[in-house]
Amino acid sequence: MISCNKTKFRLGELFCGPGGIGVGASLARVVAGDCEYLIDHVRATDYHPDTCATYRRNIFPKSPERVVCSDIRTLDLNRLKEISEIDALAFGFPCNDFSQVGEQKGIEGEYGPLYTYAAKVLHFFKPKWFLAENVGGLSSSNEGKAFVSILNEFKECGYTLYPHLYKFEGYGVPQARHRIIIIGIHKDVKLNFKIPAPTGVRRTVRDALKDIPSDAPNQEITKQSAIVVERLRHIKPGENAFNADIPAHLQLNIKGARISQIYKRLDPDKPAYTVTGSGGGGTHIYHWKEPRALTNREITMLQTFDDLTKVA
């Protein structure tokens, strides 16, 4: 057997959140010819204290100083450099202004322009490659102009780009999550990227949630008000508050857009609908059988986090 020469990329992360990309990076492994490519995750940053605490606990428990909790608009890049140089960068820049659920202000909103700070990091460190992630609505935001502006700015940093809309349920994820991922390879680096084809593996909600231990962390059963419990009892798996046969006194008095995820119950034999970051106003993810929202543990399983991950 021919042994592989190992190449490790030192990965830095922006907008790290609680660790989704970090977990994926720790598991990443590519073998091409006689070379094996791995990722050594060296640092991360986010502005939210609880998020940073969760990240430290699960990704960098032995070196918590590698997580810098700071607003990216005032982030000291030299401080990051003192922690470690990097060969690669990953960032899921904020999607609030690009999401189709919301005002869709795009790069004219409060969060939309934050991608420019990621571009500054690219200019400063010049990593060999980067991965950027955002919602599918990015491509149509500001009549498509936002996406073009973002791609142009990343190109000007010296990168060849490979943007693609991935439908993750086609890659074995138990959730219909559609996200644009932009891979950038620095023009001075002789690496190629090929967009991976869907695996054909299909995982359902039932598959994802069937083996959660009773003593798993963050598995506390959620509590709903009496009226929500009564409403959910009239909603079948896969239905929501607007297409289910609900008695008049339980119907929602909402004018205008009727968001399909309001009080929507999961279909156990399909991938879940997209997990969102809100949860208010009936937008929690609701169990298909029990009249309740999912637990934090169940939601993390739909997001494919390891079942031992703990929320700080």
Image (cartoon, grey):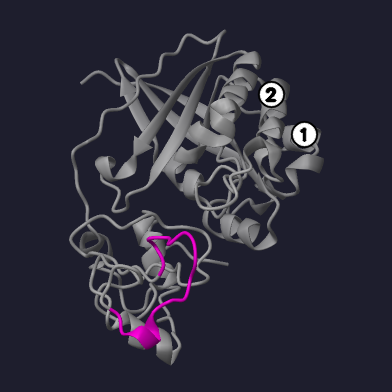
Pick the front one: 115 or 83: 115
> Which residue is rendered at x = 19% and y = 47% of the image?
202
* Spot occupied by residue 278 in the image (x, y as percentages of width and height): 53, 63
Q: Is residue 35 left or right of residue 98?
A: left
Tell me the tag on residue 8. none
The crowd level at tag 1 (other Cα within 10 Å; few <14, some 14-19, many 20+) is: few
Point out which mark residue 125 bears.
Answer: 2
User: Label 2 near label 1: C-beta < 8 Å?
Assistant: yes
- The residue located at (27%, 40%) in the rendering is 171
Please provide the residue range marked out in magenta: 246-262
Q: Is residue 34 left or right of residue 253?
A: left
Neighbour tally class for label 2: few under 14, some 14-19, many 20 plus, Cα within 10 Å: some
Q: Quadrant of residue 302?
A: bottom left
> What number of labels is visible?
2
Residue 68 percent location from the top left of the image: 71, 48
Instruction: Tell me the chief SS of the magenta region.
Output: loop
Residue ID at (52%, 59%): 277
Q: Secondary structure at mark 1?
A: helix
Amino acid type indicated by mark 2: Phe
Query: Label 1, on which residue?
Result: 77
Cα–Cα gap, marks 1 and 2: 9 Å
Q: Amino acid at mark 1?
A: Leu
Q: Toward the viewer: 41 or 204? A: 204
Percent across and percent down for residue 118 are 66, 32
